[in-house]
Image (cartoon, helix red, strand yellow):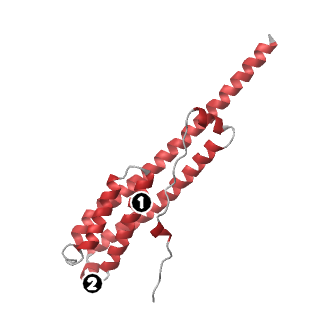
Amino acid sequence: MEIYTMLLIFIAAIAFLVIIAYNGLISLKNQVKNAWAQIDVQLKRRNDLIPNLVEAVKGYMKYEKSALKEITKARAGIMNARSVEGKAKASSQLTDALKSFFAVAENYPKLKASNNFMHLQEEISGTENKIAYSRQYYNDVVMAYNTRIQVFPQSIIANIFKFKKMDSFLASESERKNVEIRL
């Protein structure tokens, strides 16, 4: 009878450890999904601000249609992207287009003095900061999740229940370049 009791305790302990490991993996997976949702919220916020920005500058920048087209094209890229990699690439393109656009806007003193334009520029700048923070948090959670599914004994549970490695939100080549400062 003792052997059955010991066997039952052993099986119960293994089951308990499997449940704890599985629940931990589910918790991290949900944190990754939530972190991605936070990035998505900020990307949508930036996308929602773009049409207002374009409308605010149309009258001032009649000859700068290419800058506006690049922003519109990059915005559409984010809206159509479905994967983390696709959204990251489209987000980087939009960030680059906005940087170029704001550089061109420096040539229009009346535009720079416009309260509407200044407000939109501040909103987009603040949103860019939130996106950067959200990306950092997302990558931290993805790293914790990927580490958990690769270490023993959780790796066994992860393989049994088919937990897959998740991609980080990586910087684009243009974001990795050194900034040139000319005085």
Look at the image and tell me in which quarter the C terminus lies.
bottom left
* Residue placed furthest toward the right: 2
Relative vertical location of residue 114 with respect to residue 12 in this rendering, above or below: below
Q: Where is mark 2, residue-wise? A: 109
Residue 96 visible in rendering: yes
Percent x, y of residue 163: 55, 38
Relative vertical location of residue 119 with respect to residue 89 in this rendering, above or below: below
Q: In the rendered structure, find residue 145 and report the number of the disc placed on it.
A: none
Q: What is the three-letter code of the residue carrying label 2?
A: Pro
Relative vertical location of residue 174 with respect to residue 9 in this rendering, above or below: below
Q: Residues within 10 Å of mark 2 (few under 14, many from 20)?
A: few
Q: Where is mark 1, residue-wise? A: 89
Look at the image and tell me in which quarter the N terminus lies.
top right
Residue at 38%, 65% (x, y): give it: 93
Q: Tags 2 and 1 in contact by the CB under 8 Å rule? A: no
- Mark whose residue sits in front, 2 or 1: 1
Residue at 52%, 58% (x, y): give it: 136
* Sequence-first disc among 2 and 1: 1
Percent x, y of residue 60: 21, 78
Under circle 2, the secondary element is helix
* Residue placed furthest toward the front: 173
Residue at 76%, 13% (x, y): give it: 4
Mark 2–mark 1 distance (CA, rounded to whole Å): 32 Å
The residue lying toward the viewer, choosing from 123 and 166, is: 166
Q: Residues within 10 Å of mark 1 (few under 14, many from 20)?
A: many
